[in-house]
Structure formats: structure tokens, C-alpha cells
């Protein structure tokens, strides 16, 4: 499905905000302290004609326990599914998919980005009943059941 560049950029901004709100909500209910979110980068967004979306997100955050990063930074990457209303352009995150990637290395962003893309664009097809997010069969797969 083709999306105009301006709409894509607006969607990335909206997705970053929604991801941060979701992370804050999860963090508030956790007893484990987590560092401040510094930036959320939306790496890749896929759309389908039925108003479904899937995207890869990378979060940069403070991490005082980061052993391998001189600046005390860590990165975490996740994959989310959601829907987008056609008229209002409002996006709703439905769920976070199972696999994620983290790194506290100095080149952590690149490591997480590569790992996430590898998992969701290459390796998912090797798990029985799963599909890569760039595979048309993904849109009717079981991850959408009950959503």
C-alpha cells in the first residue's frame, strides 16, 4: 500500500508518541526501576488495505547499569501491531509482538536495528505458523486474532 511521504512522517511521529505512552504505562506498573526515555525512533512501518499497520520501534534510554556504553545509554527494539482510522488518521496500538532486541553497546542503535530487521523481516518465516512482517500472509496470520 502506497503512503505519501508527509503522511508517513506524521504517522512515525504519532507512533513514537504512542509507543512512549505505552512504555510509560508499563513502566508505571513495574517495580523494576527503568531509566528515562531519551528518544523513540520508528524504524519501519508497513500498512495494508484493511487499515492494519505493523512497525518496528527503537527506544534510546538512560541506563545506569549499562556496562558497555560510556554514556550510560541502552537501546531496546520492539515490534507492534495496530490499526489506523482512514478519516481521522488516528492510530491505535493493539499489541507488542513477542520478540525484542536490546543492547548497551556504544553502537547499540545499529545492533538493535539490525537484529530487529533480521527477526521480523527474515527469520519469522522459519517459525511454524509465523510470517515475516513484509509477507502478505502476515496480515491474516494469528497475531491479529482477537484484535
Image (cartoon, helix red, strand yellow):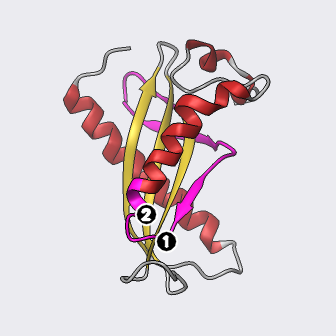
The quarter of the displayed image where residue 15 is located: top left
Residue 33 covered by magenta stretch: no
Picture layout, residue 78 above or below residue 35 = above
Q: Are marks 2 and 1 in contact (CB under 8 Å)?
A: yes
| Placement of the C terminus among the 4 image quadrants | top right
Q: Position of residue 102 (x, y in %)?
A: 55, 61
Q: Position of residue 135 (x, y in %)?
A: 55, 17
Picture layout, residue 138 above or below residue 13 = above
Q: Residues within 10 Å of mark 1 (few under 14, many from 20)?
A: many
Q: Residue at x 65, y 23 (%)?
A: 131
The quarter of the displayed image where residue 44 is located: top left
Picture layout, residue 78 above or below residue 72 = above
Secondary structure under the numbered disc 1 in the rendered image: loop
Of 136 and 23, which appears nearest the observer?
136
Q: Is residue 14 left or right of residue 80?
A: left
Secondary structure under the numbered disc 2 in the rendered image: helix
Q: What residue is shown with label 2?
A: 108
In the rendered structure, find residue 35 and report the number of the disc placed on it: none
Q: Is residue 1 left or right of residue 64?
A: left
| Placement of the N terminus among the 4 image quadrants | top left
Determine the residue located farthest toward the bottom in the rendered image. 64
Q: Which residues are magenta?
A: 82-110
Determine the residue located farthest toward the left in the rendered image. 6
Amino acid at each position: 500500500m502506497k503512503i505519501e511521504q508527509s503522511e508517513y512522517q506524521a504517522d512515525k511521529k504519532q507512533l513514537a508518541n504512542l509507543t512512549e505512552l505505552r512504555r510509560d504505562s508499563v513502566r508505571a506498573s513495574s517495580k523494576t526501576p527503568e531509566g528515562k526515555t531519551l528518544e523513540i525512533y520508528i524504524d519501519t512501518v508497513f500498512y495494508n488495505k484493511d487499515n492494519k499497520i505493523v512497525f518496528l520501534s527503537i527506544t534510546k534510554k538512560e541506563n545506569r547499569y549499562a556496562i558497555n556504553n560510556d554514556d550510560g545509554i541502552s537501546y531496546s527494539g520492539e515490534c507492534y501491531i495496530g490499526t489506523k482510522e482512514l478519516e481521522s488518521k488516528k492510530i491505535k496500538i493493539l499489541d507488542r509482538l513477542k520478540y525484542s532486541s536490546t543492547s548497551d553497546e556504544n553502537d547499540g542503535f545499529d545492533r538493535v536495528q539490525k537484529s530487529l530487521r533480521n527477526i521480523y523481516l527474515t527469520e519469522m518465516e522459519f517459525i511454524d505458523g509465523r510470517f515475516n512482517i513484509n509477507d502478505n500472509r502476515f496480515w491474516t496470520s494469528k497475531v491479529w486474532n482477537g484484535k
